[in-house]
Image (cartoon, helix red, strand yellow):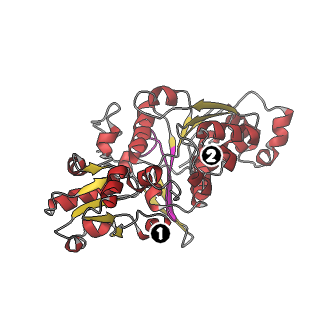
Amino acid sequence: MSLPPLVEPADELTVDEVRRYSRHLIIPDVGMAGQKRLKNAKVLCVGAGGLGSPALMYLAAAGVGTLGIVEFDVVDESNLQRQIIHGQSDVGRSKGESARDSVKEINPYVNVILHDERLDNTNVMEIFAGYDLIVDGTDNFATRYLVNDAAVLLGKPYVWGSIYRFDGQASVFWAEHGPCYRCLYPEAPPPGMVPSCAEGGVLGVLCASIGSIQVTEAIKLLAGVGDPLVGRLMIYDALEMNYRQVKVRKDPNCALCGENPTVTELIDYEAFCGVVSEEAQAAAAGSTITSKQLKQWQDDEEDIFLIDVREPGEYEIVSIPGAVLIPKNEFLMGNALEQLPQDKKIVLHCKSGVRSAEVLAVVKAAGFANAVHLGGGVLGWVNQIEPHKPVY
């Protein structure tokens, strides 16, 4: 469905702006009026990572007058495979500052507002209030629900995107004209059910594919052209080079935008999404060891059975000496339990400690009461014990 323009046009374009945006101006559906609307628009990009990188760069190039950036992280070398707004010289630097400088280099006429802070319940409403449109480049469920709920409560549209390995999704959520994110996903998946990009990986160029869709939708909303992805979910399979659409209808029973909403204010999103299950938290309490403790056990030749619950591809990148690879899913399916020795202390580890805590709950429930897991995972091990090894 076509929607009216989200913003009013600016008074004028300068001669330099006309020259810069000339290829837009000669498109009948954009023209002077559309470009003036872009100039007058205020767009907030949540995140300057995989999706935020292409989104910010193309929003800047398109001539969006004010770009906000919410980002609290720093650039890591593992980001550079996909986060193209940053370069090698930015490693260790604030992502927000790096993204701001790149945007200004692309288009000096863009006003950049940097929110160098973590988005949470205490600041989201105030930050969102100053913008016409939100572009969501987050990579965790707690923040996605936070973005959605704040946007609905403020009556603002936002463009959503998601990426994982070779697959991507995109849509536009605007409760006044269609569904919100909760209509599509009323509940967050169980903790550990959906791996993050840090755990499962992502094809770098997939960020550009989905990020460019997000920017296209943003431009259409701002200028009032075309048929936005309101009420439609775009699904992209890069391996098959296939796009398909799924209709998403507004749920009359939606807890947030339905006829009788039960969510009328921001909630505790970490608790709602259950970042770590209650079972895992209970299992890990008093059963978490440090990297130094594990190293001491190895040096003392303690009788332990060290298990790596990551995926084979992760194990090939870096591993802890003596660890046996048994992926998490084999424990969830029950296949791995028969491989566990009864006469040794079971020590579990993953990349950071989340997956191993989930497996620890399964192992303890199966009767291995003395099992423990490694807090901080292989990342903590490399940092404290073998800093010459790579991390990912």
Q: Is residue 357 magenta?
A: no
Residue under numbered circle 1: 316
Secondary structure at numbered mark 2:
loop
In percent of width and height, residue 256 lies at 34, 39
Nearer to us in this view, 31 or 55? 55
Whether residue 197 is visible: yes
Say above or below: 195 vs 99: below
Please tell me which of labels 1 and 2 falls first in the chain.
Answer: 2
Q: Is residue 164 magenta?
A: yes
Q: Residue furthest left?
A: 367
Crowdedness near tag 1: few (<14), some (14–19) or many (≥20) residues, C-alpha within 10 Å: few
In percent of width and height, residue 35 lies at 73, 39
236 sits left or right of 99 in the view: left
Q: Which stretch is magenta?
A: 159-180
In percent of width and height, residue 210 lies at 57, 56
Q: Residue at x 69, y 46 (%)?
A: 89
The amino acid sitting under disc 1 is Glu
Q: Residue at x 52, y 65 (%)?
A: 166
Residue under numbered circle 2: 91
Circles 1 and 2: CB atoms closer than 8 Å: no
Whether residue 255 is visible: no
320 sits left or right of 10 in the view: left
Secondary structure at numbered mark 1:
helix
The amino acid sitting under disc 2 is Val
Say above or below: 348 vs 285: below
